[in-house]
């Protein structure tokens, strides 16, 4: 039997006692839809591919210098073109600001900075007044400030109430926390964070997060009641009885406020979307100018357009590195915290 | 104030870049882009799907389940997120929960015959 036939046979579910191992699970990569070209100019779509290929090439090989043929008339013409494109480049740089990742890096960096300096009530700037009445459980709050990732764990049991209070903003709060989890776990290369949540077989925790969030109730008082009931039930299963149950309800109520404030922090992320659009626009401009340069054979025009793009690329790389570094501090601080709050959040999730 | 069109364009740019990086095996870079996307467009299932795939590719299935689960909740109904989650749960040996996820995916895919067919074939395996 040839190799192909062997492979086909092994993937067929025979449905008998002598069946081979279960059919392999298809890859989830196949579920990803293709990017929509109508959302961007087709030229910009092509150049996004070229953009990152260029990043990889420059990192691996180093930029190469083009030699420019110089002769009398051409030199004069090139100088004029260079001046024009330099002016355009400066204009584009002034318009684009921080760039995509730079904007996001600043946003998350501001939050992370407050987190790692452990200033209770000041994690979300401008809202100190709202947290003055959180003194009832300062240890819980100081633990919670150690990692924004915990917001997702706690919020999963109370998201119904948070939705009622904050509307669509609660989705942003959960998304923010999930993004923190993703970044920390990706950077760490291990599942230390989920393991520290006390989950044996972290898949269970993921299940609870998704399952709990699905119980979003659109009613008003019923939502808060459901959330408290969920938290209480989870505590009774996994924690220390009535005392723990009372604590988790209190925790849930605090989490509502935390989720609300998290949502407010996310508003500035809209600026990063603008920066992303600017990047796409700069790529598009580069491509147009390169085409013109090809037609007119002006080396300086190409160079100026590429420098424009490189500014955006470098800004993005620096922003990404800054973001990773800052949020690494969040992870380190989380690792130094006690397990008390983590155990509570695991209980809230209803994990046995 | 950003216009709706500007936000849509930015979101598409983020997904296009993230998708490109993912397809070329740059999972960590893709994840950085996609984390931005899920925050600016938490209701767009593609960001959660792609972010989960990134974590799968770096051998972090539990985190991937977390991403699929969050996407399923925020983008409900999301047949793709439910299906992705169901697959991973089955791989992790959580058959009961996988069955629940397949059921949720089937319900969410009621209007998508092709996807529903895939779900129905997988859930009986």
Image: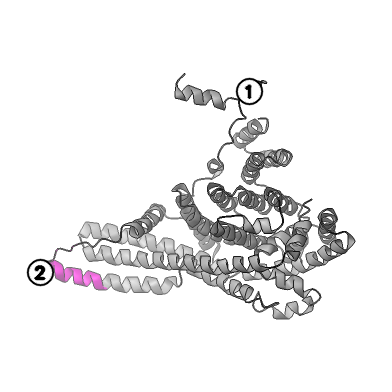
Residue pictured at 17% horizontal, 69% vertical: A77
Q: Which residue lies furthest to the top in this view?
A: A1
**Which secondary structure lies at badge 1?**
loop
Q: Is residue A49 above or below residue A286?
A: above
Q: How many labels does the image show?
A: 2
In the rendered image, residue B88, in percent from the top left (x then y), is placed at 63, 42
**Which secondary structure lies at badge 2?**
helix
N-terminal-most mark, 2 or 1: 1
In the rendered image, residue A148, in percent from the top left (x then y), is placed at 65, 66
Q: Residue A72: which disc?
A: 2
Indicate left or right for B118 with A59 as reference. Answer: right
Residue pictured at 49% horizontal, 54% vertical: B18
In the rendered image, residue A44, in percent from the top left (x then y), is placed at 40, 56
Can residue A9 be seen by looking at this rendering?
yes
Label 2, label 1: how far apart the Cα atoms are: 80 Å
Region rendered in magenta: A67-83
Q: Which residue lies furthest to the left in this view?
A: A72
Q: In this view, does A87 lie above or below A310?
A: below
**Is A19 within the magenta?**
no
Q: Residue A19: which disc?
A: 1
- Name the main secondary structure of what is drawn in magenta: helix
Indicate left or right for A93 with A167 as reference. Answer: left
Residue pictured at 73% horizontal, 58% vertical: A156
Q: Is residue A297 above or below residue A325?
A: above
Q: Label 2 crowding class (10 Å Cα cut-off): few <14, some 14-19, many 20+?
A: few
**Is A81 within the magenta?**
yes
Can residue A168 be seen by looking at this rendering?
no
Q: Quadrant of residue A230?
A: bottom right
Pick the residue in front: B88 or A193.
Answer: A193
Q: Residue furthest right?
A: A242
């Amino acid at each position: 039997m040839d190799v192909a036939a062997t492979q086909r046979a092994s993937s067929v579910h025979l449905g008998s006692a002598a069946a081979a191992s279960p059919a392999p699970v298809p890859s989830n990569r196949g579920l990803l839809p293709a990017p929509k070209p109508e959302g961007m100019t087709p030229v910009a779509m092509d150049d996004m591919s070229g953009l990152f290929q260029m990043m990889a090439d420059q990192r691996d090989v180093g930029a190469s210098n083009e030699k420019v043929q110089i002769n009398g008339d051409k030199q004069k013409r090139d100088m004029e073109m260079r001046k024009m494109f330099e002016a355009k480049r400066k204009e584009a740089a002034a318009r684009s600001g921080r760039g995509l990742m730079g904007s996001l890096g600043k946003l998350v960096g501001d939050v992370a900075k407050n987190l790692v300096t452990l200033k209770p009530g000041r994690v979300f700037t401008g809202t100190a007044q709202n947290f003055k009445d959180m003194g009832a459980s300062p240890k819980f709050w100081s633990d919670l400030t150690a990692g924004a990732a915990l917001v997702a764990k706690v919020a999963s049991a109370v998201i119904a109430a948070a939705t009622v209070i904050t509307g669509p903003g609660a989705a942003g709060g959960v998304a923010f926390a999930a993004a923190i989890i993703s970044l920390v776990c990706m950077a760490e290369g291990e599942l230390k964070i989920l393991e520290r949540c006390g989950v044996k077989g972290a898949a269970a925790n993921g299940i609870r997060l998704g399952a709990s969030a699905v119980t979003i109730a659109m009613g008003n008082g019923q939502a808060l009641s459901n959330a408290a009931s969920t938290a209480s039930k989870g505590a009774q299963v996994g924690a220390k009885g009535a005392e723990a149950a009372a604590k988790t309800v209190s925790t849930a109520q605090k989490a509502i406020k935390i989720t609300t404030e998290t949502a407010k922090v996310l508003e500035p992320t809209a600026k990063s979307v603008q920066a992303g659009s600017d990047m796409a626009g700069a790529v598009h401009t580069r491509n147009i100018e390169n085409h013109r340069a090809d037609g007119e054979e002006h080396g300086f025009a190409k160079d100026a357009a590429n420098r424009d793009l490189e500014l955006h690329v470098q800004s993005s790389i620096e922003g990404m590195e800054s973001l990773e570094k800052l949020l690494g501090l969040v992870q380190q601080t989380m690792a130094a915290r006690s397990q008390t709050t983590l155990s509570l959040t695991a209980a809230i999730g209803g994990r046995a | 104030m950003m216009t709706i069109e500007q936000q849509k364009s930015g979101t598409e740019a983020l997904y296009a870049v993230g998708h490109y990086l993912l397809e070329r095996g740059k999972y960590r870079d893709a994840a950085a882009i996609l984390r931005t996307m899920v925050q600016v467009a938490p209701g767009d299932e593609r960001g959660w799907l792609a972010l989960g795939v990134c974590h799968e590719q770096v051998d972090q299935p539990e985190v991937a389940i977390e991403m699929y689960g969050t996407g399923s909740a925020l983008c409900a109904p999301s047949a793709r997120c439910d299906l992705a989650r169901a697959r991973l749960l089955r791989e992790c040996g959580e058959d009961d929960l996988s069955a629940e996820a397949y059921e949720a995916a089937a319900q969410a895919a009621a209007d998508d015959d092709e996807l529903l067919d895939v779900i129905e074939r997988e859930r009986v395996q």
